[in-house]
Amino acid sequence: MTHNLLFAGVGGQGVVLASEVIALVAAAEGYDVKQGEVHGAAQRGGAVVSHIRFGERVYSPLNLRGQADVMAAFETLEAVRHAHYLKPGGVLIVNDHRIEPTYLNTTVKYPDDPIGFLERKPIRVIVLNASETARALGNERVASLVMLGAVSRFIPLKADSWDKVLRERIPAKLLELNQRAFAEGQKAAA
């Protein structure tokens, strides 16, 4: 069985870090892993999308429309823009966080009810306040680990593997904070 994930957000939100961690955890457990990202103008607040697929044998890093099992949207509008990648019954974990896109102007407005729009789709929607949780922990940048902790509830990767990769990938001075953020995400998605 192949597990198909999609992470979407805005530059600077940690989408690439989160997708790298999940790929490393899956590889540590012996899965064949493919990962691909699109992050053109990400450093200027542009969209970032990362496809992660793992299983016994995986040939392509890209999810097709209607194929993803789990999607983590680090920003609400990015959830709306990419929800079509989820299969019916798939899980969407969305950070209830709004970043005004740089391309919006006075004639194009942020949608009024993006969460309501998503909840009308044939998918399971889990709304988190990952950014708020991260701020409460003392650093908004760990919102990506809150999201990753939530995602971990829906994929078959072992706690020991997550812990090992976090210890290897996160700098020692930030490890404890990131581990707390990860645990908060797991708790929020339970």
Image (tube, rainbow, N blue to C red):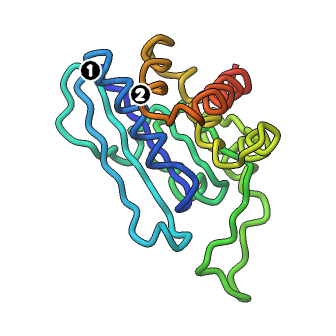
Q: Which mark is residue 168?
A: 2
Q: Nearer the viewer, residue 171 or 126?
A: 171
Total numbered circles: 2
Decide: is 75 above or below 185.
below
Disc 1: CA contacts within 10 A as few (<14), some (14-19) or many (>=20): some
- For residue 116, the mark is none
Residue under the point 47% across and 11% down = 160
> Left or right: where does residue 187 sit relative to residue 159?
right
* Front label number (2 vs 1): 2
Q: Residues within 10 Å of mark 2 (few under 14, many from 20)?
A: few
Residue placed most toward the observer, 59 or 173? 173
Q: x%, y% of residue 115? A: 73, 50
Q: Amino acid at mark 1?
A: Tyr
Closer-to-camera residue (126/13) = 13
Residue 139 image point, x, y percent: 72, 45
- Residue 153 drawn at (x, y percent): 57, 20
Label 2: element kind = helix
Among numbered discs 2 and 1, the one appearing first in the sequence: 1
Which image quarter: residue 100?
Answer: bottom right
Quadrant that contains the C terminus: top right
Q: What is the number of the mark on residue 31?
A: 1
Q: What amino acid is at disc 2?
A: Glu
Between the C-alphas of marks 2 and 1, the distance is 18 Å
State the image coordinates of residue 57 (x, y, percent, origin top left).
18, 25
Q: Residue at x 72, y 60 (%)?
A: 98
Tell me the residue at 61%/26% (across/down).
Answer: 179
Mark 1: secondary structure: loop
The residue at the far right in this view is 136
Q: Is 59 placed above or below 141 here?
A: above
